[in-house]
Image (cartoon, rainbow, N blue to C red):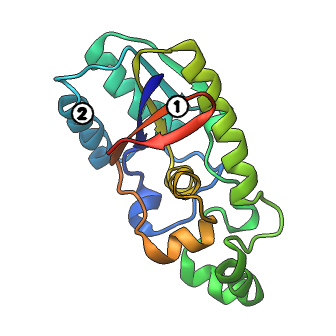
Amino acid sequence: MATILLARHAETSWNRQGRFQGHADPPLSDAGREQARALAMELDGTPPAAVFASDLRRAAETAEIVAEHFGVPVLTDPELREVDVGEWSGLTWAEIEERFPEAVARYHERGHGWEFGESYEHMAERVLAALGRIAERHDGERILVVLHGGTMRALAAHVAGVAVVEHRQHSRAALNCEVHTVSFENGALRRLD
């Protein structure tokens, strides 16, 4: 069994502005870099044996700051990326409501409203497959995986056995640098905290 610390990346200026990021690649803000350093200190008592991250800059940079603290390398994987929000990328919720009112209704019904991205379900499948490969390589170890808000939410929904749209109605989004501990054993993801 691998113990996996799932951490959301630190803050970007787009987070602060309420912009959908998806596969866009904004860097961390100065506040985000401070959050990443605080995350490293939070993990100080139980250092990870390995650090993985999405290849998007905000996740990779968060992971690099933490990994440097522990003297371990960061391995990036594009399969750990955030959901692709298509034409919503870079827009605020107000801009989306103005430009895509029909899509907003679809978002509330099925969890995504964009036309040219991917579904949360598809994203969850690719992230779960990546976590399975990582867990297999690090059986018996404690590792850190830096992800995104959407991936954290999709994984939490998977663990709870509900659809992302249902999970979103009853829970809040993960905060920047929030950590959840899970185990991955025999192909099953289970929350430990």
Q: Residues within 10 Å of mark 1 (few under 14, many from 20)?
A: many
Q: Quadrant of residue 106?
A: bottom right
x then y, percent, for residue 30: 30, 45
Note whether 137 is above or below 33 in the view shown: above
Q: Are marks 2 and 1 in contact (CB under 8 Å)?
A: no
Q: Residue at x 69, y 33 (%)?
A: 129
**Circle 1 sits on which residue?**
184
Q: CA distance from mark 2 to mark 1?
A: 27 Å
Whether residue 151 sits left or right of residue 170 in the image: it is right
Q: Residues within 10 Å of mark 2 (few under 14, many from 20)?
A: many
Q: Secondary structure at mark 1?
A: strand
Whether residue 118 sits left or right of residue 1 in the image: it is right
Note whether 90 is above or below 64 in the view shown: below
Callout 1, which amino acid? Phe
Q: Quadrant of the C terminus?
A: top left
Note whether 8 is above or below 156 in the view shown: above
Front-lying residue, 86 or 121? 121
Number of disc labels: 2
Q: Secondary structure at mark 2?
A: helix
Q: Residue at x 57, y 64 (%)?
A: 20
x then y, percent, for residue 137: 57, 13
Q: Quadrant of residue 115?
A: bottom right
Report the mark closest to the observer, 2 or 1.
1
x then y, percent, for residue 159: 53, 51
Callout 2, which amino acid? Arg
Q: Earlier in the sequence, mark 2 or mark 1?
A: 2
**Circle 2 sits on which residue?**
37
Q: Residue at x 27, y 48 (%)?
A: 31
